Every structure is written in C-alpha cells, then in structure tokens.
C-alpha cells in the first residue's frame, strides 16, 4: 500500500485543494513512523531499551494474517470509553500521561486550513490532523457513523462508536453530534445570555 501511495501522481498542486484521506491517512503516517523508528534504532544508542525490536512494526508484523484481518491502519477498533480517554490525554494528564504539550494542543485546535473539501464536497476546517469546529472542538466523525471530539475549553471529550456501519440522513450519531454541539454552546454562553 505504501508503494502504491508513493507512486501515485498528485491530482492537483499542494495547497490547491483540501481532501480528507479517509483510507490512506493511516498508511501515510504509519510509513513516516516506521521510517523514523528504523532511523532511530540505527542512530540512537538506547532506542531498543524504550522500543524493543520485538514490538516495533515491520514487514513481518504488517504481513501477519491476524494483523491484516484486525484493522485497516486508518480505522480504529476501540470502545467509546477508550477513544474518549485518548482525547482526554490530549487535553491533559490521564493517569499521569499527557500525549501533547499545552502549546501543541493550542496548535491542534487552531484552524490550519479551511477549504472546500474535495472528497465530500463541503467546506471543512482542519487543524493538525483533526477537524476543528467553530465551537472550539477538534476531532472527527468517522466513516460508518462513529465520532469523537474534544472541547478543550470545557475539558470535555465525547465519543460514540457503532458496532454496525451506518451514516447519512437520519443516522442517530448525526443527531447526537448536533445535540452535543447545542449543549456545548449553552455551556459556553456567558451568564448574561449574550
């Protein structure tokens, strides 16, 4: 898959359009991480102590039929509680673990690009790896109807996952997202009602 992506010809010049890489994002980021880990094992004398070779991804692990049946790299298989916890660790420490610094969190929440998104044909705003919304949240609604968002100003994370694919008009997950957005807007409204 990484070879196919590397050989792909761009459909437009960088910065000309916005397009969500729903199915290729995991492969793109995964290849960067894999190459970094390969470089680090060769150039950092103590890297094996913190990232043992037995658990680092490589072609053997990636080609394992059990791994291939488990997931597409851009698709998460987790509980709503787990994904909400991951988003919470982006906002601040969870059991002593904070995934990004406060400065990086501000960068994640800030719009990096707002444009007509090519794949879905609607205006979208993205920060660093996440969709960002006018209500101050960042996160994503995935294909199939699952969603996860963080509201840094409130210290709130919201996640809902499905055990069956579904999306589109009438999808209860879309109604849930609107309900959460409305409740967050109420929580952020100043006490004087303005």
Image (cartoon, grey):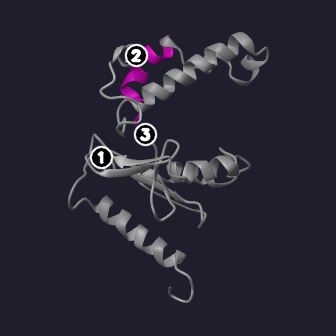
Q: Residue at x 53, y 14 (%)?
A: 58
Among the two numbered marks 3 and 1 on one chain, the one whose residue lies closer to the N terminus: 3
Q: Label 2: which residue?
A: 6
Q: For label 2, count other residues whose C-alpha is less than 10 Å away and answer few (under 14), some (14-19) or many (20+).
A: few
Q: What distance separates the C-alpha of mark 1 from that of mark 2?
A: 27 Å
What residue is at 63 percent from the left and 19 percent from the top? 37
Q: How many marks?
A: 3
Residue occupied by mark 3: 77
Magenta residues? Answer: 60-77
Q: Secondary structure at mark 1?
A: loop
At mark 3, the secondary structure is: loop
* Residue 18, magenta (yes or no): no
- Place of residue 134 in the rendered image (x, y in percent of width and height, measured from the top left): 45, 62
Residue 136 lies left or right of residue 54; in this view the side is left
Q: Nearer the viewer, mark 3 or mark 1?
A: 1
Residue that sits furthest to the bottom in the current view: 192
Within-10-Å neighbours for mark 3: few <14, some 14–19, many 20+: some
Report which residue position mark 1 lands on: 144
Picture coordinates of residue 96 (x, y %)? 74, 49
From where the camera sits, is residue 161 visible? no
């Amino acid at each position: 898959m990484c070879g196919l992506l590397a050989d792909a010809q761009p459909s437009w010049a960088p910065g000309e359009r916005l397009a969500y890489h729903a199915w290729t994002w995991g492969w793109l980021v995964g290849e960067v991480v894999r190459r970094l880990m390969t470089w680090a094992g060769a150039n950092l004398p103590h890297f094996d102590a913190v990232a043992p070779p037995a658990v680092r991804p490589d072609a053997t692990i990636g080609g394992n039929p059990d791994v291939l049946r488990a997931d597409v790299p851009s698709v998460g298989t987790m509980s709503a509680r787990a994904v909400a916890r991951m988003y919470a660790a982006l906002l601040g420490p969870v059991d002593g673990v904070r995934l990004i610094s406060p400065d990086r969190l501000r960068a994640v929440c800030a719009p990096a690009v707002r444009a007509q998104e090519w794949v879905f044909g609607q205006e979208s705003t993205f920060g660093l790896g996440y969709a960002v919304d006018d209500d101050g949240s960042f996160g994503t609604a995935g294909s199939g109807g699952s969603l996860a968002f963080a509201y840094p100003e409130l210290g709130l994370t919201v996640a809902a996952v499905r055990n069956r694919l579904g999306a589109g008009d009438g999808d209860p997950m879309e109604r849930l997202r609107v309900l959460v957005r409305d409740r967050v807007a109420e929580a952020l409204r100043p006490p004087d009602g303005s």
